[in-house]
Image (spheres, rainbow, N blue to C red):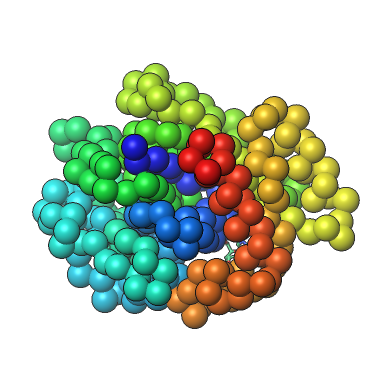
Amino acid sequence: MTKIYAIANQKGGVGKTTSVINICAYLAGSGRRVLLVDIDPQANATSGLGYDKYQVTLSTYHLLLESAALEAVRLIQTETKLDVLPAHPNLAGAEVELVNAIGREYRLRNVLEKVNGRYDYILIDCPPSLGLLTVNALTAARDGVLIPVQCEYLALEGLTQLTQTIELVQKYLNPQLQIRGLIMTMYDSRTNLSRQVVEEVRGHFPGKVFRTIIPRNVRLSEAPSYGQPISTYAPTSPGAIAYKVLTAELVKGDGAA
Ligand SMILES: Nc1ncnc2c1ncn2[C@@H]1O[C@H](COP(=O)(O)OP(=O)(O)O)[C@@H](O)[C@H]1O
Ligand SMILES: [Mg+2]
């Protein structure tokens, strides 16, 4: 059975894209068949894997508007053996263009149903908003949502709104939707604040926070400009090790270790 996860948080800069790219790379590196779906108009996951987002001709935009077939859109990241459904900046228009479309919340789910069974994991990188694109991802995310949370002041801010959106999607669109786990990112071991934030988030979401914590590591921020995941860019860096262990924790929890 294909596991489908959305990576969501309407806050920008919390580590969604970094988590998607690197978890996907480690999943693929351990021999799993993986599809990364980019539905953020900023297309950072697309460019972070080495594709020029302006050169992408067919993208998730075309899939959501049903104007191209999945096979035509799919790219293959040869180095990591990762399949990618890329985004293009024109995806920003999809929010508006889909407003009156029939089944507008189910567009991505319908697309992904066509590849059910062909992948072990599908991860969807969401934009920093709770609009129709994120709702499409949450509706398609059969196995839940992964929520990156930055270890910083006011980390919990916005999480209530996110969990309310998740509850609404669960009620009306995707009864299976659950919070699969919160990923604490950009942890700074030199500060008390980071530690306090982790404790606070654990208190609010008991049993839901991944044990593996992602440190702040400059290698993680450099890798995208080389079009590479951390697993090839700096495989022995603390950030790489953390994402590798996190991926193993995820897989183990999925009962597929
Ligand atoms: N653990 C980390 N250590 C250092 N920099 C990070 C880390 N995680 C993300 N970054 C950097 O922070 C910025 C925001 O991360 P990103 O994954 O793009 O967030 P989002 O997708 O939620 O907007 C990017 O420049 C990214 O390279
Ligand atoms: Mg992003």
- Residue 155 place in picture, x, y as percent: 69, 44
Res 131 visible: no
Q: Nearer the viewer, residue 84 or 13?
A: 84
Q: Quadrant of residue 188?
A: bottom right
Name above or below for residue 115 compared with residue 214.
above
Name above or below for residue 34 compared with residue 183.
below
Name above or below for residue 32 compared with residue 159.
below
Q: Residue at x 66, y 38 (%)?
A: 209
Left or right: residue 153 compared with residue 139:
right
Left or right: residue 75 compared with residue 219:
left
- Residue 75 place in picture, x, y as percent: 27, 66
Res 197 visible: yes
- Residue 211 place in picture, x, y as percent: 70, 43
- Residue 3 place in picture, x, y as percent: 39, 40
- Pick the quarter of the image with the N terminus: top left
Q: Residue furthest bottom?
A: 226
Q: Residue at x 70, y 50 (%)?
A: 213
